[in-house]
């Protein structure tokens, strides 16, 4: 049985100036709208209500911070690739998010989620190229892996790994068995930073 770490929602911030004042290691979630960022948070802490999930893409419009028992923070970012808002509003988000990702000192590693049901999308690749251009550390997680046929499981992960040239961790909000590996990876990164 996968372990769980209790978490609590702290605050929503529109930009870096509104972010919580904390020294905890921070892990921002990057991913297309509807990739399952909220489900990822809910599954890690085994609480289906802590992060609001929605079938409407583009619902998250702020940076939402979740404290995992004072061990680390996860920051849920607005999804890329879909938003029914004006170009002006999208540009404002982009500016605020870029500033947050590049200047927030607490950020320990990004976590990029990609949807295992589809090939890696163009904007997933663009986001990864941006991340790499700034040499930012990043963990790759393939979500919705329970939708992938068992016979295609290894192939699906390999495809993502080939595109990103990085190890990919499987994840399912339905089957919590994958949570342990996520926690383990986060813990290793925190330990490495501390030493």
Image (spheres, rainbow, N blue to C red):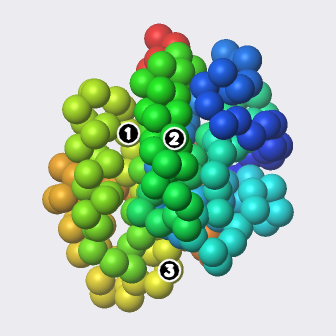
Whole-angstrom CA distance, mark 3 to mark 2, is: 35 Å
Relative vertical location of residue 23 with respect to residue 134 in this rendering, above or below: above
Residue at position x 34%, y 30% from top? 136
Q: Residue sitting at 32 percent across and 58 percent down? A: 124
- Horizontal side of 112 relative to 22 (left or right) equals left
Q: Quadrant of the N terminus?
A: bottom right
* Residues at marks 2 and 1, CA–CA distance in whole angstroms: 24 Å
Q: Is residue 1 visible?
A: no
Q: Earlier in the sequence, mark 2 or mark 1?
A: 2
Q: Nearer the viewer, residue 163 or 3?
A: 163
Q: Which residue is mark 3?
A: 146
Nearest the viewer among 1 and 70 is 70
- Residue at point 66%, 21% (across, down): 17
Q: Count residues near mark 1 (Cα–Cα under 10 Å), then give few for <14, some for 14-19, many for 20+.
A: some
Which residue was labeled with disc 1?
138
State if disc 1 and disc 3 touch (CB < 8 Å). Answer: no
Q: In the picture shown, does residue 8 fall above or below 155?
A: above
Q: Please indicate whether residue 25 sits to the left or right of residue 116 in the image.
A: right
Residue 159 x %, y %: 21, 68
Q: Does the residue at mark 2 contact the one at mark 1 (Cβ under 8 Å)?
A: no
Dot 2: what SS?
helix
In the picture of the structure, the residue carrying the numbered disc 2 is: 92
Query: Which type of secondary structure does the marked residue at label 3 adopt?
Result: helix
Residue 25 screen position, x and y as percent: 59, 25
The mark lying in front, picked from 2 and 1, is 2
| Mark 2 burial class by Cα count in 10 Å: few <14, some 14-19, many 20+ | some
Q: Identify the mark nearer the N-term, 3 or 2.
A: 2
């Amino acid at each position: 049985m996968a372990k769980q770490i209790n978490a609590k929602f702290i605050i929503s911030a529109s930009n870096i100036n509104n972010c919580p004042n904390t020294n905890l290691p921070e892990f921002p979630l990057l991913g297309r709208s509807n990739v399952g960022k909220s489900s990822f948070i809910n599954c890690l802490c085994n609480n289906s209500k802590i992060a609001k999930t929605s079938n409407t893409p583009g619902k998250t419009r702020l940076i939402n911070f979740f404290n995992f028992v004072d061990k680390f923070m996860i920051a849920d970012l607005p999804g890329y690739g879909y938003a029914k808002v004006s170009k002006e509003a999208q540009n404002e988000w982009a500016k605020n998010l870029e500033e947050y990702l590049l200047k927030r000192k607490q950020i320990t590693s990004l976590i990029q989620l990609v949807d295992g049901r589809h090939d890696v999308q163009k904007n997933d690749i663009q986001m990864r190229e941006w991340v790499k251009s700034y040499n930012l550390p990043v963990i790759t997680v393939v979500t919705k892996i329970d939708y992938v046929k068992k016979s295609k499981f290894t192939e699906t992960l390999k495809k993502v790994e080939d595109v990103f040239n990085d190890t990919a961790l499987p994840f399912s909000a339905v089957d919590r068995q994958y949570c342990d590996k996520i926690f383990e990876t986060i813990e290793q990164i925190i330990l490495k930073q501390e030493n």
